[in-house]
């Protein structure tokens, strides 16, 4: 993709209905997706705030804690039909493989309603790698996608929305919002900085992709396009 403050996530703790998926007997290991735009450019860099929705919490799931997973890119308004072509990219910022099986992927409007959820089947992301979760079933997902979550989440709002990854007790591992993506462009967290679950709360750190991909612009499974100069946070002086 091209190139705050604490968010009250208390509404995440509402009742949800686990969704059984068709992926339970499949195990996907995401270990070979390249970081094609130069991982060294953002190694050690981070645009973070002093507070955020993912900076704490006691909940864990499959050994994961808040900050291990980072939502980094969202295709909410794909070229052509939305159905089956929307997707979400998640980065493993931890130091060991992240097992997402049994976690909950949540989609809502920007204000948090209504919430739709999908229970993730078998999916593992190796450290420093990305997984792309697409709105179709595994059997017909594109080759660049890591996992198909089907139609449980429905269509994303084309103008704004909220996405979260939750643990079994509804603890937030990561959540973010997107706003005003251009038609056919993914919206992504600044590729000039290291993926960070607090930094991605800041809408100013997101921008539309500039890399051509298919009939649109996106970087699924790879380092995002820069929203700011490498090593410089959005809005920083000098």
Image (tube, rainbow, N blue to C red):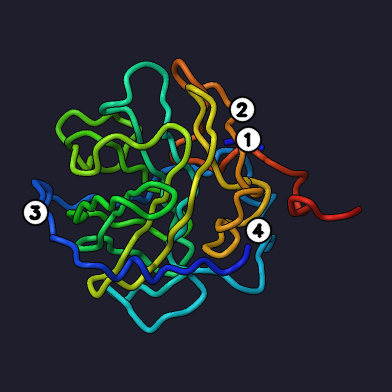
**What is the CA distance from the residue labelled 4 to the residue labelled 2?**
21 Å
Tag 1 residue: 2
Tag 4 residue: 43
Q: Nearer the viewer, mark 4 or mark 2?
A: 2
Left or right: 11 in relation to 184: left
Identify the residue shown where x is 91% and y is 53%: 238
Mark 3 vs 2, N-terminal side: 3
Tag 2 residue: 210
Dot label at residue 20:
3
**What is the CA distance from the residue labelled 1 to the residue labelled 3?**
35 Å
**What is the CA distance from the residue labelled 3 to the residue labelled 2?**
37 Å
Q: Residues within 10 Å of mark 2 (few under 14, many from 20)?
A: many
* Corner quadrant of residue 202: bottom right
What secondary structure is marked by label 3? loop
What secondary structure is marked by label 2? loop
Q: Position of residue 59 (x, y in %)?
A: 33, 80
């Amino acid at each position: 993709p091209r190139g705050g403050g604490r968010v009250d996530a208390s509404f995440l703790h509402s009742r949800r209905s686990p969704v059984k998926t068709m992926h339970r007997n499949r195990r996907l290991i995401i270990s070979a997706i390249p970081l094609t735009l130069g991982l060294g450019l953002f190694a050690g860099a981070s645009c973070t705030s002093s507070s955020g929705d993912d900076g704490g919490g006691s909940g864990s799931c499959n050994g994961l804690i808040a900050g291990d997973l980072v939502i980094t890119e969202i295709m909410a308004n794909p070229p052509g039909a939305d159905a089956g072509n929307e997707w979400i990219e998640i980065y493993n910022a931890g130091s060991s493989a992240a097992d997402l099986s049994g976690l909950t992927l949540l989609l809502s409007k920007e204000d948090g309603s209504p919430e739709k959820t999908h229970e993730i089947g078998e999916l593992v992301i190796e450290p420093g790698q990305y997984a792309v979760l697409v709105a179709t079933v595994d059997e017909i997902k594109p080759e660049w996608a890591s996992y198909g979550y089907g139609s449980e989440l429905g269509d994303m709002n084309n103008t704004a929305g909220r996405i979260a990854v939750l643990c079994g007790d509804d603890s937030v591992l990561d959540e973010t919002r997107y706003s005003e993506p251009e038609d056919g462009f993914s919206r992504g967290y600044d590729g000039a900085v290291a993926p960070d679950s607090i930094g991605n709360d800041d809408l100013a750190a997101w921008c539309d992709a500039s890399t051509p991909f298919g009939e649109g612009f996106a970087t699924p499974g790879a380092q995002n396009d820069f929203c700011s100069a490498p090593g410089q946070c959005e809005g920083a002086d000098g």
